[in-house]
Image (spheres, helix red, strand yellow):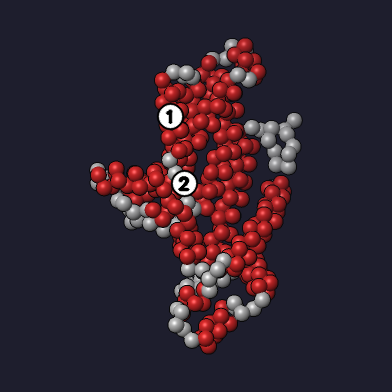
Amino acid sequence: MSALLRRLALALPTLLGVVTLVFFFVHLVPGDPVEMMLGESAAVVDRERMRAALGLDRPLWSQYLGFLARTARGDLGRSLRDGAPVAGLIRARLPATLALAGAAGALAVALAIPLGVLSARHRGRWLDAAATAFALLGAALPNFVLGPLLVLLFSVRLGWLPVSGADSAAGLLLPAATLGLGMSAILTRLTRTAVLDSLGADFIRTARAKGLSEARVFFRHALRGALLPVTTVFGLQLGSLLGGAIITETIFAWPGIGRLTLQAIEGRDYPLVQGCVLVIACGYVAANLLTDLAYQRLDPRVRFGGREAR
């Protein structure tokens, strides 16, 4: 528990750096949020009154210190667009992002691990070539291309799935497939390489020399060792999914954190942008922490703090 707390303490400077950079970068972006809220024809007096009410008339360093103090209390401020609490807006969108990230991650693992294993077990054969072609195609197609293609096929042409929205479980399939297929392509190639490296290791030859069955050697020893690098990459990819895939959520009008972030940026809604990015950064930290826990489960030698089991 103490080691876990130390890791969380080490993550705090990272979050502070992210919040600091985002705060200053957002405030340096051209455009006046007050003008966007009131319109170009608003009187100067009304603009100044609104700017004072929002605290935008204070020096930048004063706004920054105030933001840090409020964040430490769990107060992310209020949206400049509609005055609603930022924490409430993010809380309302977070379940949709978690559902999308979970579905995409599950799909990626369900495709990548079997394909990577089969590709390694049938190295140089047609199954290996097919898995390699799938991985290359998935990695080459960006989300903004794959998403519309899936919509054209399954929604427009076949009429099986809705084009967008989160009104039903069917609406989750296309955005999850858009994210999951690209992610599975990366994991498939990585799984294949990791399994081949693991099968050629000394401990595999030792296990075979002890007379263990081939199935036990593969699943108990080779595959378990191969999953370590796969877990690392999956943890990093999961962090990006938890942060919200802005392009995918925009294509499918998915009401998640990514789409909310884009709307906040377009509206120069400083508090909302800062709150969304803070949640995204926390998602990366949480994903890395879960990756460490999975490492410890897969390899007992891995311990927090860099010590190995004796």
Horizontal relation, residue 271 to residue 102: left or right: right
Q: Determine the residue positioned at 56% across, 78% down.
A: 54
Could you say where residue 167 lies in the image, as x and y percent from the top left? 33, 56
Could you say where residue 128 lies in the image, as x and y percent from the top left? 45, 23
Work out whether 122 lies above or below 99. above
Q: Nearer the viewer, residue 42 or 135?
A: 42
* Residue 147 visible (yes or no): yes
Of the 4 image quadrants, the one containing the C terminus is: top right
Question: What is the secondary structure assignment of the residue under circle 1?
Answer: helix
Q: Nearer the viewer, residue 171 or 8?
A: 171
Q: Which residue is mark 1?
A: 133
The quadrant holding residue 201 is: top right
Q: Residue furthest left?
A: 158
Work out whether 214 lies above or below 5. above
Q: Which residue is mark 2?
A: 102
Viewer-side label of 2, 1: 1
> Rounded to the nearest whole Å, what is the CA distance between mark 2 and mark 1?
26 Å
* Residue 108 visible (yes or no): no
Question: What is the secondary structure assignment of the residue under circle 2?
Answer: helix
Q: Which amino acid type is marked by label 1?
A: Ala
Q: Residue furthest bottom?
A: 45
The quadrant holding residue 153 is: top left
- State how many labels appear: 2
Q: Nearer the viewer, residue 301 or 68?
A: 68
Q: Determine the residue positioned at 47% across, 48% down.
A: 101
Horizontal relation, residue 235 to residue 156: left or right: right
Could you say where residue 169 lies in the image, as x and y percent from the top left? 34, 50
Could you say where residue 149 lies in the image, as x and y percent from the top left? 34, 44
Q: Determine the residue positioned at 45% across, 78% down.
A: 39
Q: Which amino acid type is marked by label 2?
A: Gly
Q: Determine the residue positioned at 39% across, 53% down.
A: 251
Dot 2 crowding, Cα within 10 Å, few <14, some 14–19, many 20+: some
